[in-house]
Image: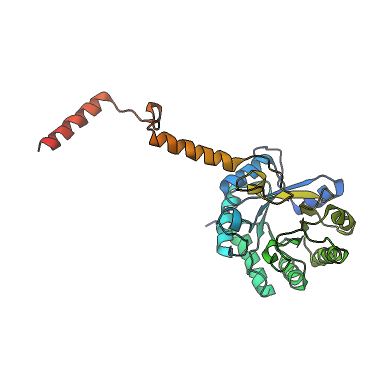
Amino acid sequence: MSSHPTVHAPADPGRLPTTLPGLIEKKRLGDPIVMVTAYDYPSARAAEAAGVDLVLVGDSAATTMLGYNATTPVDLDDMLVLARAVRRGLSCPLMIGDLPFGSYEVSDEQAITTALRMVKEAGAEAVKLEGGNDASVRRARAIAGAGIPVMGHVGLTPQTSTALGGWKAQGRTAAAASRIGSEALALQDAGVFAIVFEAIPAAVTEELMPLIDVPVIGIGAGAATDGQVLVFHDLLGIRDGLGPRFVKRYANIQQEMNDGVRAFAEDVRTRRYPGPEHCYSVDPGELAELQGQLAGRSAS
């Protein structure tokens, strides 16, 4: 009995699924790569309709979907539930599953097992892990060696933000920028297919890009990268506050949701909802028969 995840046909029948060779070709041609996060079926369908190249089921779900104030509390079971929902909404974008904090750091065996679950149970086509230290590089190499494509992530790595001094830009000194470059090169040598640069000065990114052969996706890293990613809730304004400096808000859906629910509550309290147009009808003869039956019950 098949257990393959359900996928949908693309809205544009001429559009082909994103592949790893296709990403390399985009980098070669200078064709910008578009990536967004998604956490459920509706956000996946929005990404599909927009024709993005990559969809990351990010551990940012901890803050956007589950109400935590950091990414570290989300666990693998949480991520698998979300990833399966995203898988059902995608056909063409390449789906990447984030490996949550604590699910890959202990050993190569743990990392491979986690990555396998993300692929087998959720239908991810690749996984992402954070950091470019020796341990992260070993884990990336082990997962890639098991045949699972891996995306790296350097600069601001939210899972270890405490060790980095908080959620702030990285690489603002020559030594720090050089370290980020070394980490990116180590991940590339380990076999990652792409690397996220997060919260890195644009000028530093420009210096590092000629050294990197794999596609680089930026988030707060300037315009020199091969592509850009934003968190779904940040770009659509499904959150309180403005978010990080690098966020460009393309909608204000949180306010729309607030206003919609508020209007519904007001309509209910003032009995404007439901109106006649929201109600179902019944045949008058059937209603008369019911009334007679109810009257008989009342009399008894």
Q: Position of residue 75 (x, y in %)?
A: 58, 64
Identify the residue shown where x is 39% and y is 36%.
269
- 54 relative to 145, above or below: above
Instruction: Find residue 191 and report its image quarter.
Output: bottom right
* Front residue of this view, candidates 125 and 60: 60
Quadrant position of the C terminus in the picture = top left
Q: Position of residue 179 (x, y in %)?
A: 84, 67
Identify the residue shown where x is 53% and y is 38%.
259
- 298 relative to 57, above or below: above
Instruction: Find residue 97 and report its image quarter.
Output: bottom right
> Is residue 41 visible in the rendered structure shown here?
yes
Q: Where is residue 107 in the image (x, y as percent from the top left)?
A: 68, 75
Q: Where is residue 183 in the image (x, y as percent from the top left)?
A: 81, 66
* Front residue of this view, candidates 72 and 10: 72
Tell how many labels.
0
In the drawing, does residue 62 fall left or right of residue 171? left
